[in-house]
Image (tube, rainbow, N blue to C red):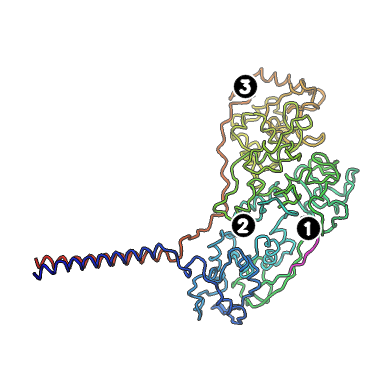
């Protein structure tokens, strides 16, 4: 009877153990998968304790290197910074001062051996939220490159819109041989005027992550399109000592220059009493911490290696050129007007202004959209001078705010180039597609010009800025090549027009059969001994320009056609490639037709002939995608404590399962022995 009574007891014991183990496992699972407690959330708790101590603390921290600094925090400065309580997402003390266990009071000794190591550790915290970047500096060439704290400060982090004023003084703390004007121009070159179009951030924002591309783009024709003589003395190409009736203004009247390769146009402020002749200078006072009483060498980072005390302070007043303000201190961007003469770089002479606007005409409505970035036609304000990153990649403010999710436009799209390298009329009646954005269909925003003032009878361009219209004429290569197949956009490339390679080298990559020009162009042997022949002489002749001067190459790639000049009434009505070089009275279009016909009779055009177009060129390799200058910071999106929970869950689960299995074996063994 005793054995019979003990069997239910054993089963009851097993049931209790199994049930208990299951309850423990369920409780642990609920704890692991449940919400994270407030004290372990991603944001640290309010740091009132830190503030109470550090607002008026006079404590001085001395590092093993002998460097010292105070731990006082200027709370008003902190609160007004981008990390302050007024920010959309306030940053707490322990967000940056990581390893919070070190900061429990009383504080554990700081392991940093010198100030550089101390700052370097803080910089690691920055990369938890921000992309790692180091614009303006080549870290590989620097023994000790600047850190986030060196450039952005610690408790006085400036907002994005304030960096143009806040960064230059910090630059001068290291670059002691430079001037405030240099720093301002370097940090924020060619800032715009007024309120630009919505969503534009400016190319300097791109520089934060794509600094390698930014630095090479910075020297391109696009970036240097508009220049300010006040900050760039080399901007003026015109000879103001050369007297000319077309030039009725002095160099002091020039506010900005447009162009620097073929021609240069000049802008001034409208003389209507609403503008000032000189820039408004706004003093900015900033406090810069320096590492010692003795002046630092140029380009020396402010770190422990400078070997001086951090307690010394310097107050520096920096003068910066202010832009026209809405209060009327300067005229608005709409008050920029065209001056009556332009400088021909090719002819080295003054000419009356011609082309897109007349003397005294307001510049932005006439042609400004393709000379600035982020134009707002409602206010005539714009984000920046010149063709910036967003002219080709679209508005980037959203991308800058959320680079992992929002991506800029980066397809190889000839329409982006065509938005400015075309002529016509927008639905709003403007001579440029003001509402076009990269990724749109250009024809939805623009009607291309077709009248005789802009195109020759064969359809090719006769005015400047019409290369895309040439390209659309239907040549076979348009289906295979892109603008970027020949032209570089992010660096100056090869002369004279930012080519991928020198011109002839570029052409023979596809047209290798024509590499021997002396065979490809018969009857030109003597001429080739006198000057360099280029493929563009015959296949991209200078058909476009302003006025009577033709200095820009056509991009139609049509075959030389002297017969067209005869059919359309002569060279004045329709130029041809042959007579761009052969200009004597005896060398008229009829002579050119006869010469070409004679050459064709000598050899049938074929891939191996000495004269002829050769085979259809093979397609070039696809353009190399634009490299990314910076990769996203690796951000750990795991909730704090979650990994620890799962680890403990696994350990406890194994222990409970082991105990349960052990008890089961004991009970089973006893049952077997009694049986």
Check if residue 283 falls in the magenta segment.
yes
**SS category of the residue bearing label 2:** loop
Check if residue 480 falls in the magenta segment.
no
Residue 295's image quarter?
bottom right
Residue extending farthest to the top is 601
Camera-nearest label, 2 or 3: 2
In this view of the protein, can residue 581 be seen by the observer? no
Question: Distance of mark 1 from mark 2, alpha carbons?
Answer: 28 Å
In terms of sequence position, does the residue under pointer 1 or pointer 2 come before the other? 2
Measuring from the top left, give residue 296's x and y in whole percent: 67, 71
Q: Nearer the viewer, residue 221 or 36?
A: 36
Measuring from the top left, give residue 21's x and y in whole percent: 28, 66
Residue 70 vs residue 578: left or right? left
In terms of sequence position, does the residue under pointer 2 or pointer 3 come before the other? 2
Disc number placed over residue 208 in the picture, else none = 2
- Locate the C terminus and report the quarter of the image it occupies: bottom left
Residue 442 vs residue 36: left or right? right
- Residue for badge 1: 326
Question: Distance of mark 2 from mark 3, alpha carbons?
Answer: 54 Å
Measuring from the top left, give residue 589's x and y in whole percent: 77, 22
Measuring from the top left, give residue 548's x and y in whole percent: 82, 34
Disc number placed over residue 605 in the picture, else none = 3
Q: Residues within 10 Å of mark 1 (few under 14, many from 20)?
A: few
Residue drawn at x 45%, y 68% as measured from the top left? 37
Q: Which residues are magenta?
A: 280-284
Residue 533's image quarter?
top right
In this view of the protein, can residue 105 be seen by the observer? yes
Residue drawn at x 64%, y 75% as measured from the top left? 74
Q: Nearer the viewer, residue 293 or 667?
A: 667
**SS category of the residue bearing label 3:** loop
Question: What is the magenta segment's predominant secondary structure?
Answer: strand
Residue 281, compared with residue 247, is above or below; it is below
């Amino acid at each position: 009877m005793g054995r019979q009574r003990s069997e239910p007891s054993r089963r009851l014991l097993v049931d209790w153990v199994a049930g208990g183990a299951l309850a423990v496992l369920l409780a642990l699972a609920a704890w692991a998968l449940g919400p994270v407690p407030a004290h372990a959330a991603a944001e640290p708790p309010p740091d009132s304790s830190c503030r109470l101590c550090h607002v008026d603390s006079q404590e001085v921290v001395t590092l093993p290197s002998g460097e010292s600094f105070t731990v006082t925090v200027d709370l008003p400065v902190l609160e007004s910074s981008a990390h302050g309580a007024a920010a959309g997402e306030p940053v707490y003390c322990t967000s940056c001062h990581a390893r919070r266990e070190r900061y429990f009071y009383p504080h554990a000794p700081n392991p940093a051996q010198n100030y550089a190591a101390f700052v370097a550790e803080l910089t690691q915290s920055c990369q938890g939220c921000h992309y790692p970047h180091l614009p303006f500096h080549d870290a590989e060439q620097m023994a000790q490159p600047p850190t986030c704290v060196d450039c952005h400060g610690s408790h006085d982090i400036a907002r994005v819109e304030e960096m143009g004023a806040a960064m230059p003084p910090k630059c001068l703390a290291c670059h002691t041989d430079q001037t405030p004007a240099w720093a301002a121009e370097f940090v924020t070159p060619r800032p715009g005027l007024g309120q630009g179009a919505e969503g534009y951030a400016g190319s300097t924002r791109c520089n934060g992550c794509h600094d390698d591309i930014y630095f090479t783009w910075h020297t391109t024709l696009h970036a240097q399109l508009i220049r300010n003589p006040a900050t760039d003395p080399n901007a003026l190409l015109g000879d103001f000592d050369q007297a000319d009736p077309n030039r009725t203004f002095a160099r002091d009247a020039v506010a900005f220059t447009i162009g620097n390769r073929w021609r240069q146009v000049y802008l001034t402020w409208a003389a209507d009493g609403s503008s000032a002749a000189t820039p408004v200078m706004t003093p900015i006072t900033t406090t810069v911490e320096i590492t010692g009483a003795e002046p630092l060498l140029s380009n020396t980072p402010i770190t422990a290696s400078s070997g001086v005390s951090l307690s010394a302070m310097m107050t520096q007043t920096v003068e910066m050129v202010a832009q026209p303000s809405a209060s009327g201190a300067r005229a608005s961007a709409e008050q920029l007007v065209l001056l009556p003469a332009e400088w021909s770089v090719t002819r080295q002479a003054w000419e009356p202004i011609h082309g897109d606007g007349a003397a005294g005409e307001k510049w932005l409505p006439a042609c400004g959209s393709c000379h600035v970035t982020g134009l707002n036609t409602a206010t005539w304000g714009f984000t920046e001078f010149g063709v910036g990153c967003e002219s080709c990649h679209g508005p980037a403010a959203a991308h800058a705010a959320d680079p992992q999710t929002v991506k800029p436009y980066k397809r190889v799209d000839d329409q982006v180039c065509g938005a400015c390298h075309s002529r016509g009329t927008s639905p709003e009646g403007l001579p440029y597609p003001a509402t076009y954005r990269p990724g749109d269909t250009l024809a939805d925003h623009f009607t291309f010009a077709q009248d005789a003032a802009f195109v020759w009878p064969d359809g090719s361009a006769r005015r400047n800025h019409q290369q895309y219209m040439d390209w659309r004429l239907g040549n076979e290569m348009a289906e295979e090549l892109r603008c970027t197949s020949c032209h570089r956009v992010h660096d100056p490339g090869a002369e004279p027009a930012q080519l991928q390679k020198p011109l002839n080298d570029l052409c023979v990559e596809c047209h290798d059969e024509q590499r021997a020009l002396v065979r490809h162009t018969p009857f030109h042997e003597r001429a080739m001994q006198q000057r360099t022949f280029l493929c563009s002489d015959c296949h991209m002749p200078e058909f476009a320009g302003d006025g009577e001067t033709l200095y820009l190459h056509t991009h139609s790639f049509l075959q030389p056609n002297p017969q067209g000049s005869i059919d359309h009434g002569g060279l004045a009505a329709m130029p041809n490639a042959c007579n761009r070089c052969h200009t004597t009275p005896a060398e008229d279009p009829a002579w050119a037709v006869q010469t070409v016909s004679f050459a064709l009779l000598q050899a049938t055009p074929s891939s191996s002939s000495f004269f002829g177009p050769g085979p259809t060129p093979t397609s070039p390799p696809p353009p190399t995608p634009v490299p990314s200058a910076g990769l996203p910071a690796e951000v750990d999106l795991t909730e704090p404590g979650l990994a620890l929970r799962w680890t403990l869950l696994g350990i406890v689960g194994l222990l409970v399962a082991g105990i349960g299995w052990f008890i089961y074996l004991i009970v089973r063994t006893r049952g077997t022995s009694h049986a």
